[in-house]
Amino acid sequence: MQRVNSSDILRKPALLSSSDVLYIEDGRKHILKSVLLPIDLYETVREQIEAELYLRRNAKALDAKAYAEFSETEQVVEDLAL
């Protein structure tokens, strides 16, 4: 795992093809902004990421209580599926 800032990527574009996980932080504020995953690791967690993105896009349809309840139910269903 390597922590870089956005200007490091502009200076060294080869960092984007790194086999390590890259934590990309804002150059001025030093706040973590993004995480860059190697493709083999992404393939492992892809379904979980896509499910979370779907939930975030549709969060307005669920209020906070319903979202929390759905998240708990989803976890139980995943545990039973394994």
Image (cartoon, rainbow, N blue to C red):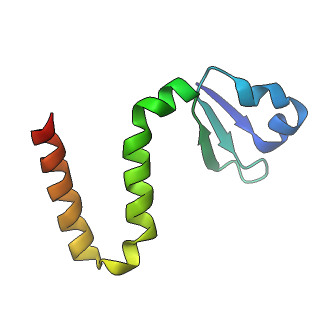
Q: Is residue 48 left or right of residue 5?
A: left
Pick the quarter of the image with the C terminus.
top left
The answer to whether 37 is drawn above or below residue 20 in the figure is: below
> Could you say which quadrant of the image residue 60 lies in?
bottom left
Q: Is residue 59 left or right of residue 74?
A: right
Residue 47 at what x, y percent from top left? 38, 43
For the view shown, which residue lies furthest in the top direction? 19
Q: Say which of 47 and 1 sits in front.
A: 47
> Could you say which quadrant of the image residue 72 lies in?
bottom left
Residue 56 at what x, y percent from top left? 43, 65
Q: Is residue 71 left or right of residue 42?
A: left
Residue 46 at what x, y percent from top left? 44, 40
Q: Is residue 38 left or right of residue 65?
A: right
Pick the quarter of the image with the N terminus.
top right
> Could you say which quadrant of the image residue 73 lies in?
bottom left
- Residue ID at (72%, 25%): 17
- Number of marks present in the image shown: 0
For the view shown, which residue lies furthest in the left direction? 80
- Residue ID at (18%, 44%): 78
Residue 7 at what x, y percent from top left? 84, 41
Q: Say which of 44 and 27 sits in front.
A: 44
The answer to whether 13 is drawn above or below residue 25 in the figure is: above
- Residue ID at (17%, 66%): 69
- Residue ID at (83%, 31%): 13
